[in-house]
Image (cartoon, helix red, strand yellow):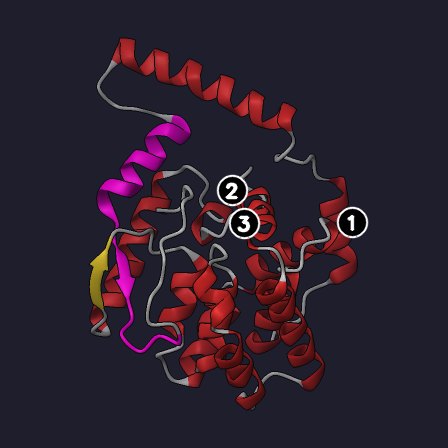
Amino acid sequence: MQLLKVMARVLEYPTEELQASKDALNAAVLEDSRLPRQKKEQVLRCLDLLCEGDLLDLQESYVGTFDKGRATSLLLFEHVHGESRDRGQAMVDLMEEYRRNGLEIDARELPDYLPLFLEYLSTRPWDEIRNWLEDIHHILGLLAERLYQRDSLYHVVMDSLLVLSGRQSDRQALAKLVASEERDDTPDALDKVWEEEMVKFVDDQGSSCNTGGVVGQRRRELEQTQTIHLSDQLMTDATPRPSGNA
């Protein structure tokens, strides 16, 4: 399903390659037969903004949206398991799912990274795609509302994926919930997290060889996971994004 590849590209760190691929991306959206016309128009508008905007501004906005705090993280299991050990097992299980379907392992990446997951789904039959999207519809709905309330253009992608899942979210309830949340991407919130993790790191250095908290979680994830490379990409030259997802 080419539309899912488009959404994967849109959710990745903005690059010159993305902007140069505007015509191919637009064509894939227009050719899709499952997304309603209104949603297609919104996705096309999103592509216009990404492909015609100033690249440095877009990159700065992307980092501010997805790489500060966890509320809008593109790592799916972070919204389900947080830092628990269950997250590690869930990633192992997902990696096995990729391998069972013959995907070539090319480089290191976290398997629950949403753009990667969408690329995987783009190779699967529609019924399977629908089932997977239905399984994560609660995450998509929450991300959509958080991004919407932050005036982010990326909420369009989450809304469109939610439509494809066939599940409706309670927008009123989500809007109320998100409005009541304390932002985790403010300077004060980020400083607090950093201070807490530094304390944990120092404690671990003095007590054992294991590293806890976010620092340890990231280290364990990078040690046990790899990225999936799909040969039939819309863009043949994908540039790695300089952020914490890899």
Side of 26 relative to 109 (left or right): right
Q: Quadrant of residue 182?
A: top right
The residue that disc 2 covers is 67
Alpha-carbon distance for marks 1 and 2? 24 Å
Amino acid of disc 3: Gln
Q: Secondary structure at mark 3?
A: helix
Q: Secondary structure at mark 2?
A: loop
Q: Secondary structure at mark 1?
A: helix
Q: Are marks 1 and 2 in contact (CB under 8 Å)?
A: no
The residue that disc 1 covers is 176
Mark 1 or 2: in front is 2
Side of 186 relative to 34 (left or right): right
What percent of the width, then of the height, locates residue 12?
47, 58
Mark 3 or 2: in front is 3
The residue that disc 3 covers is 59
What percent of the width, then of the height, locates residue 63?
54, 44
Q: Between 86 and 188, which is closer to the camera in this rendering?
A: 188
Q: Which of the marked residues, 1 or 2, is nearer the chain's N terminus?
A: 2
Q: Which of the marked residues, 3 or 2, is nearer the chain's N terminus?
A: 3
Mark 3 or 1: in front is 3
Q: Quadrant of the N terminus?
A: bottom left
Instruction: Answer whether residue 233 is visible to the viewer in this image.
Output: yes
Amino acid of disc 2: Asp
- In the rendered view, would you say 33 is above or below 236? below
- In the rendered view, would you say 83 is above or below 14? above
Label annotation for residue 246: none
What percent of the width, then of the height, locates residue 28?
50, 83
Q: Are marks 3 and 1 in contact (CB under 8 Å)?
A: no
Q: Quadrant of residue 139?
A: bottom right
Magenta-drawn stretch contains 113: no
